Image: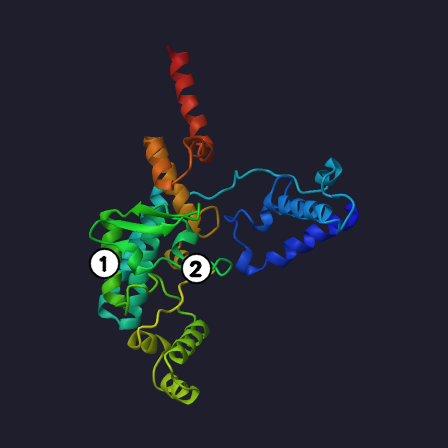
Amino acid sequence: MTELSLFRFIPVCIECVSDQSFSDDDDPLSAASAHTNGPYFTIVRAFLGWCVDDERIDANPARPNRVKDALPEHHGDHDRQFWSAETREALLEFVGERAHDALDESADARERAFRDRALVTMIALTGARGAELFADPRDEHRNGLRWDDIDLEQGIAVVFGKTREHQPIPLTDRVVESLEGYRTVLDPATEDWPVFPTRHHASLAKTTEEGLHSQGWNADDIEATLNALTSMEVLREHAIAPPALSKNGARSLMKRLCDAANLDIDGEYLKPHGGRRGLGSDLYAQDAELAQELLRHESIETTHESYREQNVLKRRDRLMRLLEE
């Protein structure tokens, strides 16, 4: 394999994973990471190193420095989105008013509105990552937050963190209140139900069929039941947990909510990870160590790096005070 064929191989890898299910600008393995020290190049180079060790090729064509020169230039993460406190509150007020107005509407409309309020509140006020709240089709261990992961009395949820360990996160009274109202409306059949089930009809139907089949139902009885009831009704009646809303589903929902609320940041919808960053930014301005603990960064240096622009602003203020003395 020559350097030229490697150049052709890397864009093919990127194209293969840059469809909708992989187009996550907050994901370190997104196509945006295809730069000199990005995960894509690191993975390709490591794989070719294994090929050398296994005597499949004579040399690693990704090793020479001239290969790196052909890769896209990395411009950092200057354009990462942060929800401002004002924007965050505007969205929270919008979903709160919709939930209140839905009290007199149908059960389905009420469930949607209460779900939207709970989802936005969790994104905005917990510092949780999308992959910790919603399902990731690429990772079997990330199947969405479950009701048995949440202790509403103590105000704590346990998420499957970035370190692939279960980590507790605090829930403020506002988050607990939104979850309590939503749980009452949703009425999950079991504790292992996802907090945010998908509403994708095909996924629900597939889960219903598989669940009933595992309980000993034959195909004819399953078909007759699904003709008489909705998939969600059958799932609830037979205590079968539905699939969780996916990360892409959550993004689509946020886009619709932002359109309805007429809210955006620099022309873009409020992205889920922007809620985490925005909350972290507000906390960092007051207490860097608290920000580190809430965001569950492994070190304070990671927190400082994440909010380095605020560090610059602090240094500017100190410089101005020093010069004025």
Q: Are marks 2 and 1 in contact (CB under 8 Å)?
A: no
Q: Is residue 46 above or below residue 16?
A: above
**Tag on residue 180?**
1
- Residue 299 or 49: which is nearer the viewer? 49
* Dot 2 amino acid type: Ala
Question: What SS does tag 2 mark?
Answer: loop
Q: How is the image coloured?
A: rainbow
Amino acid bearing label 1: Glu
Image quadrant in which you'd find residue 116: bottom left
Residues 290 and 46: in front is 46
Image quarter of the C terminus:
top left
Residue 72 appears left or right of 273: right
Question: Looking at the rendered structure, which numbered label has been put on residue 135?
Answer: 2
Q: Name the residue furthest left.
A: 153
Secondary structure of residue under mark 1: helix
- Rendered image quadrant of residue 59: top right
